[in-house]
Each structure stands twice: as C-alpha cells, then as structure tokens.
Amino acid sequence: MPKITVLPGDGIGPEIITEAVKVLQVIAEQGNASFTFEQFPVGGVAIDQTGVPLPANTLEQCKSSDAVLLGAVGGPKWDTLPGELRPEMALLGLRKELQLFSNLRPAKVYDALIEASTLKREVIQGVDLLVVRELTGGIYFGEKTKVETEQGIKVTDALTYTELEIERIVRLGFETAMKRRKKLTSVDKANILESSRVWRAVAEKVAVDYPEVELNHMLVDNCAMQLVRNPKQFDVIVTENMFGDILSDEAAMLTGSIGMLPSASMGTGSVGMFEPIHGSAPDIAGQGVANPLATILSAAMMLKYSFGMNEEAEQIEKAVFNVLEEGYRTKDLATEDSKVVTTQEMGDLVVHALKS
Ligand code: IPM
Ligand code: MN
C-alpha cells in the first residue's frame, strides 16, 4: 500500500493539496490501489509550530514513505527571517536529504487554453516541451560567504558542480529525450562560466551513448529569448539548477498560467517528490481562487513516476483536459466566455470527469 506523505505548506498550499488528494482518493477507489495519506508541517507553518522550516519528524516521515506530495512554502510573514531559517530552506533540505537530483517540469499547451496565454496562437499552439532541471547542486547549494570590507559587505554564492553531478542529470535528459521526440537542448553559459564549459564537455561525452538523440547547446540568455520567440523548437531542455528555475517559470507562461505546471523530483533514492512549480501565492491564499490543476497534474506525475500507474496518470490528464475543454477556468485562466470556478469546484469537476 503506497504511503504518501502530504506537505501542504503555506499560502494556497493547503487549498490546492486538498483537491489533489481528493483526486488520488478517487483513483484509489476506482482501481485496486489504496494509498495512505499522512500530513506533516513544512515551511512557514512548521516554523510557527516548531521553530524550524523542516522539522526532523517531517523529514523522517518523508524518508520512510513512497512519495511526497507538496503544496508550496513561504510568505511575507517569514520574509524577514535569516536565510537559513526561511521556509524555502525546507524545500532545499528535502531535495538534498531525499537526493532528488532531477526535476522534470513539462510545459504542454492545451488547445482550450490558447486564448489565456499572453502569446500569439501561432507561437504556442502545439507546444510540448520538458525542462529537466538539476536540483541538488549549483548556486543553490554552493558555499556562501559574507564579510565586512571597506566597501561594505562582500558576498559570494558559489556555483559548484562535479562531473558526476552533471553526468547523471544530462544522462537523464538523454533518456527522457529518447522517450519523446529525441531532441535535447543543453542550456548553459559556456561563454562565461567555467562550470558551463565542463557541463558542455560532459554533455558531449554522454551524447556518444545516444546517437539517435539530436543534441544542441544553447546559451541561457538565448534560450530565454527562443522560448518566447519559437517555443516549438524545443523538446527536452536540460540545464543546471538556477537556469532551470528561471526557464521553467518562463516556460510555464507559454501554457497560459503558472498555475498549470506540475513537477516531479526524482533521484538516487526511492522516494519521489511532486509539487506544482508555482509558489504559495500569499496574495490570493484563503480565497478559493487558486488553480489546483498544477498540483493535480503533479499527483498524476506521482502515479506515473513513483508507482508506475501510467494508465491512471493518463486518466487524470484526460480529465483535466476535458474540464478545460468544457470551458471551466479558475480565475488565473479566465477569459470573457469562460465559466469561472473556485479551487474546490475545479477539483470536483476533475473528480466528476474521472468518474464519467
Ligand atoms: C521552485 C521554487 C523554489 C526554487 C523556491 C521556492 C526555493 O521557485 O521550485 O521553482 O527556487 O527552486
Ligand atoms: Mn521557481
């Protein structure tokens, strides 16, 4: 019986998580699966309850479960805390402790949502790309220094990678491309960064094992531009931690709303973590207007990547597709003629579509 640790977190986290759990419960009812859900504090709520963003008990529970479903963390209430005590440190701690070195962020444009995008129809129609982001290295985890000098504070965030860390994520990029359209874009800043030059060399080396995959290298600034100029040129993008963070937010907007993008984090261990790529959106928390679809689609990724339940994952994707086709939208996606629904109603609609 798969054991799922549920970490709702802050802001809109609890609202969107409720809908995703509801959907997973229906999947369990319909099939032979049965899941257990156990909920634990993480992020700001954990700071309030225990003084730290990632309590030892929460981490232990995650480690002993089969998969983790996470909402979002952070909010203005905790913004003035020192760096290592911020809610976001919980995320980084989980990624590191669960050894989740890879983060898959698919951006697929649904036909029904084309009008919701800020970009032109001909640019985005048919976009189907996947960002493979390195998640446990780079500038997020490098050494930090902060010293007083005559010119004021002098501060460093180091961007560090080993060849091994680069190779395993690049390899996953190739493996993923093999299952898709066999096109891999490795994104770096090799004209400036030493780490990127090593990244590029490793990518070239790994490419030898995947002769069927067309590999190209792209500088990150160019990639940011190409994503809005002609996103259809991309199949799989593989890149380091911070470039992937930035490019995946950009890729999200191709789909119309950041509220649509799910993610799966996998690694060397057996526990996967699944979360929407958006944040805790404190400005709209508690109003019932948040879009739960990214979290529901993250639950689908859990079924696929952690439990091998590909069919059930597809059922969820199809249900989401149908609900959107029928014109239902949360506020973030609403256009003139859409039927605007609340967070909970959107969850109910997906459940209904699953049942029919
Ligand atoms: C994300 C988020 C996180 C990140 C933050 C909240 C630490 O933006 O998952 O993309 O930067 O990785
Ligand atoms: Mn981000």
Image (cartoon, rainbow, N blue to C red):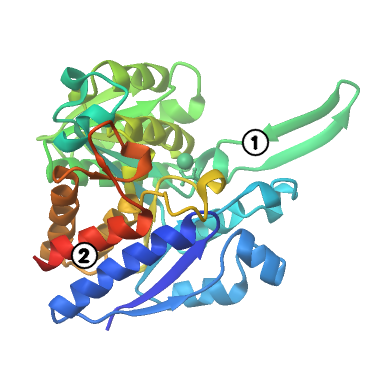
Q: Looking at the figure, which quarter contains the C terminus?
A: bottom left
Relative depth, front residue between 281 and 306: 281
Q: Residue at x 72, y 67 (%)?
A: 51
Q: Residue at x 40, y 63 (%)?
A: 17
Q: Residue at x 32, y 23 (%)?
A: 118
Number of the label disc, if any, that sits on residue 157:
1
Q: Amino acid at mark 2?
A: Val
Tell me the mark number nearer the camera, choosing from 2 and 1: 2
The alpha-carbon separation of the residues under discs 2 and 1 comes to: 45 Å
Mark 1 nearby-residue class (10 Å; few <14, some 14–19, many ≥20): some
In which quarter of the view is residue 335 placed?
A: top left
Q: Looking at the figure, which quarter contains the N terminus?
A: bottom left
- Residue matched to label 2: 351
Residue 165 in percent (x, y) is at 42, 46
User: Is tag 2's residue or tag 1's residue first in the polypeptide sequence?
Assistant: 1
Residue 316 in percent (x, y) is at 18, 59
SS under mark 1: strand
